[in-house]
Amino acid sequence: MDPLFTRLSPILHLTRVTTAFAAIGNVWFVILWTRAEAVERKRAATELLDRDLWWLLGGGTLYAIALFMFGMALNDTLDVRRDRALHPERPIPSGQVSIDTAARLVACTLLLAVLGAMALGGLAVFLALLTAGAILFYNAGAKYVPSIGLVALGLIYAAHMIAANIELVFVWPVWLVMTHALILGAVTHRLGKKRPRLSGAMIGAAGVGWLFWSGVLLYAGYRRTGGLWPEWVSPWAAVGPGVLALLFIVLAVLKARQAGSGPRAAEKLQRYGMLWLTLYATAWMLGQGHRTEGLILGGLALAGFLGMTVLREVYGLLEHPVKYRR
């Protein structure tokens, strides 16, 4: 096996880069949707309209993947003591990645995220820094209070997505991503048997938080359009994402039954749940009749699935090399 990849493997594990395609897909969706719709273009920042598409998608990719890696690296850096007791196989507790290397990775990925956001405009840089602060808040303590942490997780995904165009008129795709992330976080928390255990009171409190921020987001869309659903968006655009949401529920149940409960099952469901976000983006585009943009996002979803599959196989070979019998 390539020695370079062997050295990079712990870093890839640390940053969970195989699931970063969902973050890219969310940002690409906002960029492509904004440029495709006349109503969105009227409110969008000039950077999204005047700059070449390849420049915007490239900057969006750097911003999305770097901020995602920042969150993952920060999580494991702050959790090192807990992981030494509960997950000694992870890169930092196992000694594959030092604390100093992880700290440098946190700083570098944050810097790269800001550089990527600069391609999308000044407001995107502000949102990138605000989202980074929310990620720090989540990892520093909110995730240990599920009623707060689950809501914060959904808001992080929403803020990360909308940074490309804070004036987005059609907010339902952002609401769906926020809701999906919150529910996925709750299911994987319970499936992975994380502490503290989710109680009915915690779920209820998280539900109240979700209702509040859903109201804030949808009210912002209402103020910009004069209605909950813009007239210029086809009602058929919601069919694909709605069907995908139902299919994910079925997939989650099947995967949970196959893999059982525990951290491994939760991690597997998390990977598929992240990939699902790019499928939502593809469905919104195709439902609105934007075939080219839908194909771009569909290609990204396929690349994410293939990349996830290939890298998981490579990880397996590195961790459990094939040996010849004598």
Image (tube, rainbow, N blue to C red):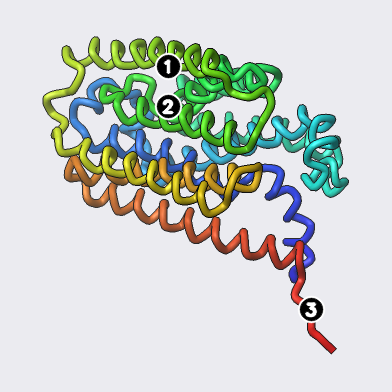
Quadrant in which the C terminus is drawn? bottom right
Q: Give SS at disc 1.
A: helix
- Residue flagged by tag 2: what amino acid is it? Met
Residue 307 in sight: yes
As rendered, which of 18 and 257 lies closer to the eye?
257
Quadrant in which the N terminus is drawn? bottom right
Relative side of 239 to 265, left or right:
left
Q: Give SS at disc 3.
A: loop
- Residue ID for mark 1: 210
- Which badge, 3 or 1, comes first in the chain's sequence? 1
Q: Residue at x 64, y 47 (%)?
A: 264
As rendered, which of 175 and 60 lies closer to the eye?
175
- Which badge, 2 or 3, comes first in the chain's sequence? 2
- Which of discs 2 and 3 lies nearer the camera? The answer is 3
Percent position (x, y) of residue 186? 52, 29
Percent position (x, y) of residue 85? 84, 35
As rendered, which of 257 and 76 lies closer to the eye?
257
User: Which label sits on residue 323?
Assistant: 3
- Residue ID for mark 2: 178
Relative side of 286 to 304, left or right:
left
- Residue flagged by tag 3: what amino acid is it? Lys
Residue 223 picture quarter = top left
Q: Residue at x 36, y 43 (%)?
A: 53
User: 302 above or below 182?
Assistant: below
Q: Residues within 10 Å of mark 2 (few under 14, many from 20)?
A: many
- Residue flagged by tag 1: what amino acid is it? Trp
